[in-house]
Amino acid sequence: MKRKIILIAATVLMLPLWVSGQNLDDALRYSRIFYQGTARFNSMGGAFTALGGDLTAIALNPAGAGVFRTTELSVSPNITFRSLNANYNGSGTDNNSSDFGLGQIGLATSINLGSGSGITGFTLAYSYNRTNNFNRNAVIEGVSENGSMADFWALQANGTNTWDLNNAPYMAYEAWLIDTLSGEYTDYASIFSYYGEDNPTYGQKVKRTIDNAGQSGEHTIALAANIGDKFYVGAGFGITTFGYTGHYVHREMDDQDLVYDFVDLTYTDHFNATGTGWNFKLGTIIKPIESLRLGLSFTTPTIYKVDEAYFSNLSANLYNEIDGPANPEINMDEMTYRYRITTPYRINAGIAWQVGSIALLSADYEFVDYAYARLSNGADGYDFYDENQDLKAELRNTGNLRLGAELRLGSLYLRGGYRLYGSSFQPGTLNEDSRYNGFSTGIGYRQRNFYADLSMSWLHNNESYMMYPDDPRTNPLYVSSPVYIDNMNKCLTATIGLKF
């Protein structure tokens, strides 16, 4: 049944609690770790599982705290520069932004018990390290050739009676962007096909503005023992926190009057999330000979309690010659939800080789099984069964490689590193080849009781971003073209350290 267009403004005062759609994106966002630690750690690619002796390294392997011989304090502010290119149906946009933050702060204190083959010392260490930067700004623009967000809302509404609709499909129905097919009560189509009566017509301009913000960080407390300067063991406790704001404004505009009745739509989606979690770490470093170190560590899954607040609104401009203009607007009041996310466990293995007194070479391999991530304990008793099945089907285990080198020229240190993060997605999925590649370099100056380090690191990846739906291959009825995004993050870090 087609509804006549009349002037109306509607406000949604109450919708079901389940609104923010916790899904794979949330689990993956809080599971990924890209340490922004000390300048030395960053410049050597983070390859410190076997090296230790660095206040960020204890987050990878708590046994690394046992390498300290004195009390040491360090702080590491940084500046991150981001460039993002988005290409949608042949239309490209460039977006640049930057921010200042604290990458690391930490303190280690050691107790020396002498020499020999037994326990020769203990070290207690604390370090805060930023683990991810969620800031992201982008403008995506282009002309849609084969779909609309209204089509996706119609797809979501299918199988539901009009009086049971909620969230975005409800808003789209109230804004006359979707409606039931003639003679049907649970099958829907969008205004782009005149609610199923004509072949779909597209060609509208699309513009999405994304303004995401936030970060995650980890407080690590580690206790390590030095056994004869040959064997180091350590245990750590991690307290993790994050804050994230996800915000986008999606617009579609029919400037050429191609779609019957439709002029434009504007949809705003906004949510804030905060979370606190914890994990445990165990690790060891072995020195079979003086120049060689082998490291191994295990970090348990991190269990987060997450609180979200969510709202959205939708407005449309419609017009036909019989009824004239209509400007429906639907606003959803802020809602809240609480649930739990369990991130994957991590296994790190490393090797480091000391070349006399002039150089260090190190390599790490990290194993992460992203398919292990889970959503659970919804505030309303929801068990996330379908979402967790999607996680297992879409995500996979992967390996991360980190390489580092350091050249010592008296008090001057020159450093370089490389990082490769494998794709988190299963073969055959949209982002199966979405890897991260990173290069880094740095310089340091060290005296007996003082050091200063500077590093510059680059991290690059390509990804395909779906505006609607998440993956067109899972929804053959309505598809959208992917947005191809090229990301480059550059991070400048300075560390000041004191030993006493």
Image (spheres, grey):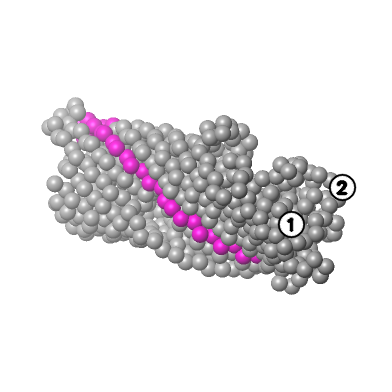
Q: Quadrant of residue 466?
A: bottom right
Q: Nearer the viewer, residue 370 or 409?
A: 370
Q: Position of residue 423 (x, y in %)?
A: 53, 47
Q: Which one is nearer the viewer's eye here, 152 or 33?
A: 152
Tell which circle, 1 or 2, labels the residue nearer the N-terminal end: 1
Question: Pointer 1: what residue?
Answer: 176
The 10 Å Cα crowd at callout 2, few under 14, some 14 to 19, many 20 or more, is: few
Asked which secondary structure carries label 2, the reply is loop
Characterize the magenta stretch by its predominant secondary structure.
Answer: strand
Q: Amino acid at mark 2?
A: Gly
Is residue 229 highlighted in magenta? yes
Q: Position of residue 102 (x, y in %)?
A: 32, 54
| Residue at 54% over, 45% down | 335
Q: Is residue 285 visible?
A: no
Specify start and end residues of the magenta stretch as a single range: 206-233
Residue 233 sits in quarter: top left
Question: At numbered mark 1, what does the secondary structure look like: helix, strand or loop?
Answer: loop
Residue at (37%, 49%) from the top-left corner? 130
Identity, as a three-letter code, of the amino acid under mark 1:
Trp
Q: What residue is pinned by disc 2? A: 183
Figure quadrant of residue 4: bottom right
Q: Mark 1 and mark 2: span between their CA atoms? A: 17 Å
Of residues 386 and 5, the one nearer the viewer is: 5
